[in-house]
Amino acid sequence: LGSRPLLSPPEFASAGAGAMAKYAALASILLGSLVAAVGAADGLVKSDNIKFHDGLSREDKWKSIGHKGITLWMTGLSGSGKSTISVALEHALVTKQPRPYFVYRLDGDNLRFGLNRDLGFSPEDRKENVRRVAEVSRLFAEAGAIVIAGLISPYAADRAYAREVHANASLPFLEVFVDAPLATVESRDPKGLYKKARQGMIKGFTGIDAPYDIPEAPEVHVRTDLNSVTQSVNIIMQHLDQAGIHLPRRFRQLDENEAPTCTAP
């Protein structure tokens, strides 16, 4: 970005305090706007007593940060490495670059403790889960964040919806297929869910008795059974470099009132 490759696992170094405070404030403002992202599931606004209020332009927000917003949609089976790679990527972008980037990570499990706590894992709930995360991702990307949205999102139609939300807003979107064979993710089984699914204790588990539509043309395809976490992060950052999110910067010129005056000795 002109991103520096992640040469070793994240060391959780601290970024510049001023920049981090600015990004935290932006994230706080956006979180306060999440209600706007969870409207009617049928796509229709159910009240005609509301009005959309414009504010600071997207371009001005991006200029203040130095890069455009973009969403990285991390999809893959449970245990494929979505969360691990997402966290490593977040640290690579925030703490391992010459200057920190504005990054916000939306983890599928984490969101089910709050925004999506009313949703289960039925096909209908999975669809609504993706809809909400897609809309929230758009809000953050509008503000200039590099959004890392990690959730299984097993249905191709739902992932296409997430892409369409961004396309309609003229925002960049990269589908990242975090891929590993079923045998590999079952052997990892970090939450013990595959074992429970095989024993019939969990019904409708993706990859076992519920389908996962393999992405046909993802912008990024990472095989986590063949690549380390570091290699996977570097692959994603290479595609970020190619996405054209950087904005050229120029020095701000002084006006006459700001320039210091010189007096003859």
Image: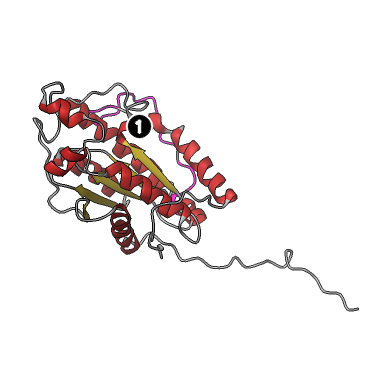
Instruction: Relative to 165, say whether 92 is above or below.
Output: below
Q: Residue furthest right?
A: 265
Quick check: is 100 in the magenta stretch? no
Quick check: is 44 in the magenta stretch? yes
The reply, left or right, for residue 66 in relation to residue 149 is right
Q: Residue at x 41, y 44 (%)?
A: 104
Q: Principal SS element in the magenta part?
A: loop
- Residue 38 in view here: no
Q: Residue at x 40, y 48 (%)?
A: 90
Which sits in the foreground, 181 or 102? 181
Instruction: Relative to 166, say whether 262 is above or below.
Output: below
The range drawn in magenta is 40-59
The reply, left or right, for residue 138 in relation to residue 250 is left
Q: Residue at x 42, y 51 (%)?
A: 10
Q: Where is the C terminus found, in terms of image quarters?
A: bottom right
Q: Position of residue 167 (x, y in %)?
A: 26, 49
Q: Secondary structure at mark 1?
A: helix
Which sits in the foreground, 139 or 221? 221
Q: Residues within 10 Å of mark 1 (few under 14, many from 20)?
A: few
Which sits in the foreground, 133 or 8? 8
Q: Position of residue 258 (x, y in %)?
A: 72, 64
Q: Residue furthest bottom?
A: 264
Q: Position of residue 20 (x, y in %)?
A: 54, 47
Residue identifier under label 1: 110
- Residue 35 in view here: yes
Q: Where is the N terminus found, in terms of image quarters?
A: bottom left
Instruction: Relative to 117, say whether 3 is above or below.
Output: below
**How are the residues colored?**
secondary structure
How many numbered marks have been drawn onto this rendered protein structure?
1
Q: Residue furthest front?
A: 187
Give, as a three-letter code, the residue at label 1: Asn
